[in-house]
Image (cartoon, grey):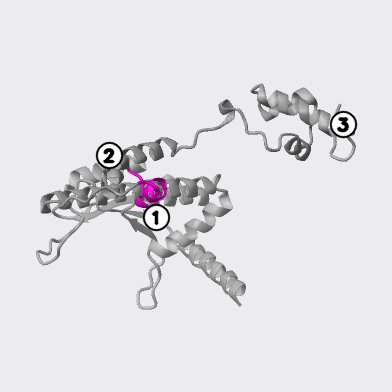
Amino acid sequence: MTHSLGKYADFEGLRERALALRRAGLSRRQIRDRLHVDNNDLLNRLLEGEPPPEWTKQPRAKDDLRAKARELRLQGWTYDQIQVELGCSKSSISLWVRDLPRPERRKRTREEASAIAKRGWEATLRLRDEERQRTKQAAAREIRQLTDRELFLVGVGLYWAEGAKNKPYRRQERVTFVNSDPDMITLYLAWLDLLGVESGRRRFAVQIHETADVASAEQFWADHVGVQRAELLKTTLKKHNPRTNRQNTNESYRGCLRIDVRAGADLYRRIEGWWSGMVVEAKQRTA
């Protein structure tokens, strides 16, 4: 039988039964099913003031850290030392141990202070990176499935930002896209697929600094776009300028990939038109 707040006559009797079940170790769901109480407000009133059994309490993720932080503080550890040991923020440590006596200060050597500062900064960077990764992962989940229209609009904006464009002083209606980010290349190729640009119309060429590992870069880009290395157009080498302090010198540097679409004049005109239409719509939204 289902009870409601205003209709059940023997509330005190029902409360006694609910409290007895709670003290016997039953959960809210078990009590609800046992007494046939489907109204959460009524169930809250029946159990008011009675704590849940220990087995139903979900442990908080930071309970163990808090206990360990208090233990270390009682041993005389500083906030810096606890932060390095546990990898948690100083603000959390302060909340957990503020009721404990402060440890007696000991004069540290310069080397000790420097080592503590270094470990503290490393712990801070690690926490920042963990937060950064959590934010990125949460944002990535917001995208869900990319529709054809969304991909179409993204591709138009991507090309207009990174692709070759017709200039009043240089009339060239050609579709050429250059980028160093493999993920950008992947998205651009997916956009070309959506537009129906056949693979036979696509040409690829590497653009890279002459002091880099050219052969490795060519193989990487060929593998990335699914062609043989011999199918790549001639690689463009950038001359070395000894006065330039290059930062892209590690093993991950693979230069840029250029993607040309053969017979692309008509496609270029459409891209230009699509972009113009997007700008018109944007202006109307801000008018």
Residue 267 is situated, as x and y percent measured from the top left of the image, at 48, 60
Q: Residues within 10 Å of mark 2 (few under 14, many from 20)?
A: few
Above or below, comparing residue 169 to residue 49 in the picture = below
Q: Amino acid at mark 2?
A: Gln
Above or below, comparing residue 197 to residue 64 in the picture = below
Residue 208 is situated, as x and y percent measured from the top left of the image, at 22, 55
Q: Amino acid at mark 3?
A: Asp
- Whole-angstrom CA distance, mark 3 to mark 2, is 56 Å
Instruction: Point out which mark residue 262 bears.
Output: 1
Q: Which residues are magenta?
A: 87-100
Q: Which quadrant holds the N terminus?
A: top right
Residue at (57% x, 74% y) in the render: 283
Q: Amino acid at mark 1?
A: Arg
Residue 90 is covered by the magenta coloring: yes
Disc 2 designates what residue?
75
In the rendered structure, the answer to whether residue 41 lies left or right of residue 130 reads right
Q: Residues within 10 Å of mark 1 (few under 14, many from 20)?
A: some
Disc 3 designates what residue?
10
Q: Earlier in the sequence, mark 3 or mark 1?
A: 3
Q: Nearer the viewer, residue 256 or 227?
A: 256
Kind of element beneath mark 3: loop
Query: Of circles 3 and 1, which is in front?
Result: 3
- Whole-angstrom CA distance, mark 3 to mark 1, is 84 Å
Kind of element beneath mark 2: loop
Residue 251 is situated, as x and y percent measured from the top left of the image, at 20, 46
Q: Earlier in the sequence, mark 2 or mark 1?
A: 2
Q: Nearer the viewer, residue 177 or 284?
A: 284
